[in-house]
Amino acid sequence: MIEQLHVCYWCHRSDTDVDDENERDKEDDRYDAIDTDEIHLPNDDENFGDRSNNLEVENTSLGASPHEVTITVAAIQAVVAEQFGYQISYQKAMKAKRKAMTRLFGDWYKSYAKLPRFFLALEQSNPGCIMYSKMVPGNNPNEENFQRVFWAFPPSIKGFAHCRPVLSIDGTHLYGKYKGTLLIAMGCNGNNQLFPLAFAITEGENIDSWSWFLACIRVGVTQRKGLCLISDRHPGIIAVVNETYSGWT
């Protein structure tokens, strides 16, 4: 089912999120000896020593600079060892990086909750922008969990009418906390250049997500007949194309 995007409270919770959260809580309990805001340089593993030797984790791990977000956990360990003569554990360095990333870019959970307002603002600033979303019921009353969102910009929708009758579709994996897949549809203009047409963020590549994505294109983007569909022949795409009423046969 395709739904117009509306503002409501979203959260993101996959089937494995509850187990993951319990596991993260256990992990956090194991490493509570380290303050996530600052690493105290100890005289030994049991005594944290003078607090005047405190080291701000964010400044050390990422240099408070967004362009250094690719720094590895091992590199953080090496920086601390070189500058302060103390070897921190891999788990402590990993927790420090996670804290620094949250400070730089915000919390993953809260970011998903802001998606409805973000897309509403995008729609209002781009009249004619197509937005569809799909949510599933949450665990609490009046709560909906984010599953998918589709969007296409008006210049692309209008411009595709003047492109070659070719549509390329593909997906790429997202490697954030909640994973997922970015689906994209591209046309080909008169100069044989790629023409971005439509996008979607889904839970993954499967028959249901590809069926929903291609249905969104047919409903809101183009009803053009005789399109040549180019893909990597993912089983989900093949299944959708072979459906009699998919609009792509």
Image (cartoon, grey):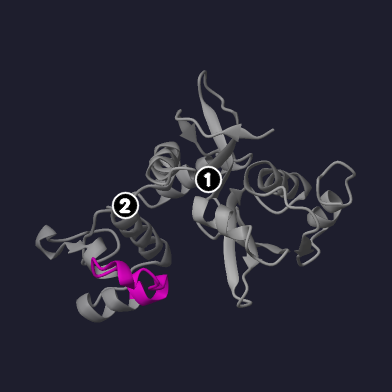
Magenta residues span: 62-77
Q: Which residue, as the protein is rendered here, is positioned at the far bottom?
A: 82
Q: For residue 33, which numbered disc appears in the image?
A: 2
Mark 2 crowd level (few <14, some 14–19, many ≥20, 10 Å Cα) = some
Along the horizontal axis of the image, is 54 left or right of 165?
left
Q: Secondary structure at mark 1?
A: helix
Dot 2 amino acid type: Ala
Residue 104, by quadrant, is: bottom left
- Count the numbered circles shown: 2
Q: How far across and how far down the image is residue 57, in percent?
A: 25, 62
Q: How far across and how far down the image is residue 9, in percent?
A: 45, 29
Q: For residue 109, which numbered disc appears in the image?
A: none
Dot 1 amino acid type: Glu
Residue in front for this viewpoint, 220 or 23: 220
Q: Is residue 164 visible?
A: yes
Residue in front for this viewpoint, 181 or 121: 121
Q: How far across and how far down the image is residue 116, in percent?
A: 45, 37
As for residue 66 lying within the magenta part, the answer is yes
Q: Residue at x 51, y 50 (%)?
A: 154
Q: Which residue is mark 1?
A: 23
Q: Secondary structure at mark 2?
A: loop
Q: How far across and how far down the image is residue 10, in percent?
A: 48, 33
Mark 1 crowd level (few <14, some 14–19, many ≥20, 10 Å Cα) = few
